[in-house]
Amino acid sequence: SQNTLSQTNILGADRESGPVDSDLRGNTAGISNDGSRTILDPFCGTGVILQEAALMGYSVYGTDVSEKMVRFSRDNLNWAHDKFKFRAEWQLEIADAVTHTWRQPINAVACEGFLGQPIGGQKPTPERLEHIMHECQTIMRGFLENISGQLTPGTRLCVAVPAWNIDGMLHQL
């Protein structure tokens, strides 16, 4: 049986795998990238989306609930800056996307939302999958409710949410 987590490919670079393909370019079309525009990734993880946006000339703002992930983002942004010499500014904060108040302005939001606890390549029981999906839905709903009052009308928001393919059956939020 196959157990996969569907994810959007996002370009970035990290020291282990190098550059990967991206859908971010199309999602930022029409947004000025002269360095005066800021893209927020509220679930920044290791900083892949932040790197891509910085390489495209955007200022980037990343937050993550995990101090470890914010540290990884910082390390990867420093590495990408040294390797590719981009001129973008960045800021990182430890923050819970469900409750945080972000600094303004935010000109676009691009993120891979909360994916749930790793299942380690094991097929989850139906109860475990239900628990993971409920947790993801709760966090994503809380994030969207939180950020909705912090964005100006017309701000672009691109959020990848998880889906699980278990034995050929797709489970979506």
Image (tube, rainbow, N blue to C red):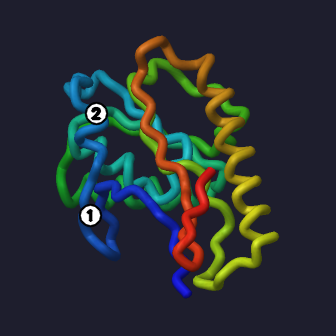
Drawn side of residue 167 relative to residue 18, left or right: right
Q: For mark 1, does the 10 Å Cα neighbourhood hold few (<14), some (14 to 19), or many (20 or more) residues? A: few
Image quadrant assignment for residue 28: top left
> Measuring 26% from the left and 64% from the top, which residue is drawn there?
20
User: Is 164 drawn above or below residue 122 in the view shown?
Assistant: above
Structural distance between the alpha carbons of marks 1 and 2:
17 Å
Drawn side of residue 4 relative to residue 27, left or right: right
User: Is 19 drawn above or below residue 90 in the view shown?
Assistant: below
Placement of the N terminus among the 4 image quadrants: bottom right
Q: Which mark is residue 28?
A: 2
> Measuring 47% from the left and 59% from the top, which residue is drawn there?
46
Q: For mark 2, does the 10 Å Cα neighbourhood hold few (<14), some (14 to 19), or many (20 or more) residues? A: many
Nearer-N-terminus badge (1/2): 1
Amino acid type, label 1:
Val
SS class of the residue under badge 2?
loop
User: Is 36 drawn above or below residue 16 in the view shown?
Assistant: above
SS class of the residue under badge 1?
loop
> Measuring 52% from the left and 68% from the top, which residue is drawn there?
5
Give coordinates of residue 53: x percent, y percent.
30, 42
Total numbered badges shown on the rendered structure: 2
> Measuring 54% from the left and 41% from the top, which residue is drawn there?
42
Give coordinates of residue 157: x percent, y percent.
45, 31
The foreground one among 108 and 38 is: 108
Give coordinates of residue 121: x percent, y percent.
58, 83
The residue carrying mark 1 is 20
Most extreme residue toward the bottom, as rendered?
Answer: 1
The foreground one among 156 and 125 is: 125
- Mark 1 vs 2: CB contact within 8 A: no
Amino acid type, label 2:
Thr
User: Is 88 drawn above or below residue 126 in the view shown?
Assistant: above
